[in-house]
Image (cartoon, rainbow, N blue to C red):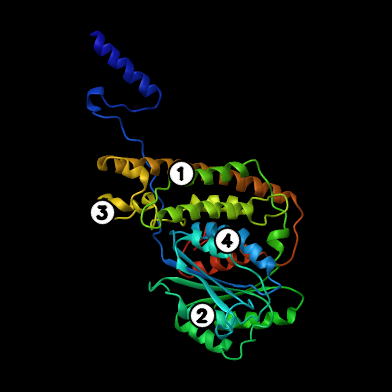
Amino acid sequence: MSALLRKFAYSVAVALLAGVVVAPVWAQEKPAEKPVAAPVVAEGPAIDLVICLDVSGSMNGLIDSAKIRLWDIVNELAKLKPTPNLRVGLYSYGHSNYPADKGWVRKDMDLTVDLDDVYKALNSLTIGGGTEYVARVSKAAIEEQKWSAEKNAMKLVFVCGNEPADQDKQVTLTDVAALAKKNDILINTIYCKYGRDDEIAGWAGFSEKCGGKHMTIDQNKAVQQVVVKTEFDEQIVKLGEELNKTYVAFGKDGKDRAANQLKQDENAKAAPGVAGAPQVAAIARAESKAGALYRNSTWDLVDKMKEKDFDLKKVKEEDLCDDLKKLKPEERLEYLKKKAEERAELQKKITDLSAKRAKKVEEELAKKPKTDGEKALDEAVKGLIRDQAKTKGFEVPGEKK
């Protein structure tokens, strides 16, 4: 055997012992490209979710709970199989500064896939006096939103608040319930207890008429409850921030959208927090950013690249970010692929750490005494969504279809 052949045979043997299959050196015209994790895309039915929050004087706990727990709700939806095409809208009602002719109701966000915009709107809400018209805000949500026209779409409204549900004398709960059923929209009610339990029946009766479900919660529970702090928390938040560097903005408002992404990271870190775990919202947001429902294809080319008919050449030169403009046209796609690889790696790290964190939290909570009482906002919403998702053919993790 010649020296050359002996050298080749030795190389192959070493590779096989290492569990690696190699091709002959003369067949390797170029180094194998690093595989990019296939993105998880929305492939299931649409889920349109509109949240209506009472912002009257007594509802600070509800708004704080929403700021803390919105990302937990998104993460719960991301577990559904097949992965849904999620859009979220937001209304607030009951503020004395809102127009009286609209029943003190304000549309804060149209249904959108841009969860950063939803969180921005949520963080802009203020509390102040007012009259709470449950029927009026529900009617507005039904009539003003451009709901999915898909046959199997799940269309949900969650109305959260307290005081009597039938205060509105111009718009009745019965008429709104008929309108909801006509449009195949389920209205769920979440009553925030404050010592007037006689009001609960009215809220429960309204959701029943709408084909939805009712839940009574302690609006302050998300702020007061003790949450386990783990050694993974800081790492998850930091990785979530590192993800921002993999976004490649484009379009007229690309820079503004990228800036908004950073701002909502800060808002999540500044959320009220809970005892022992001040960054609970930031952790949940980082987990959402690693999941399939956090999509930004309207301003980010890496997400845009996942679309079937994507063609970078069709993006106008003036709409490209500075980093891409500096590159030759033939180098730009490789740049995006590299960013996609970086993102996939970061998302996997977040997912792996989140699994470890969830296990640690479960173990620690098992050691604590169980307490009875009303659920927190996220517990209520997640529970209702799971039940209603199953009726639309979704599989819920840990439950039979």
Label drawn at residue 279: none
Label drawn at residue 140: 2
Residue at 33% x, 18% y is: 11
Residue 224 visible within the image: yes
- The N terminus is located in which quarter? top left
Residue at 51% x, 72% y is: 156
Q: Position of residue 176 (x, y in %)?
A: 53, 85
Query: Hey, what amino acid is under mark 3?
Result: Lys
Residue at 32% x, 44% y is: 325
Query: Hey, what amino acid is under mark 1?
Result: Lys
Callouts 2 and 1 close, C-beta under 8 Å: no
Q: Give whichever of 68, 1 is nearer the camera.
A: 68
Q: Earlier in the sequence, mark 2 or mark 3?
A: 2
Q: Quadrant of residue 331?
A: top left
Q: Earlier in the sequence, mark 4 or mark 1?
A: 4
Question: Which numbered disc, 2 or 1, marks the residue closer to the eye?
Answer: 1
Callouts 1 and 3 close, C-beta under 8 Å: no
Residue 379 visible within the image: no
Mark 1 = which residue? 245
Q: Label 2 to label 3, Cα distance in Å?
A: 39 Å
Mark 3 = which residue? 314
Question: Which numbered disc, 4 or 3, marks the residue closer to the eye?
Answer: 3
Residue at 49% x, 70% y is: 391
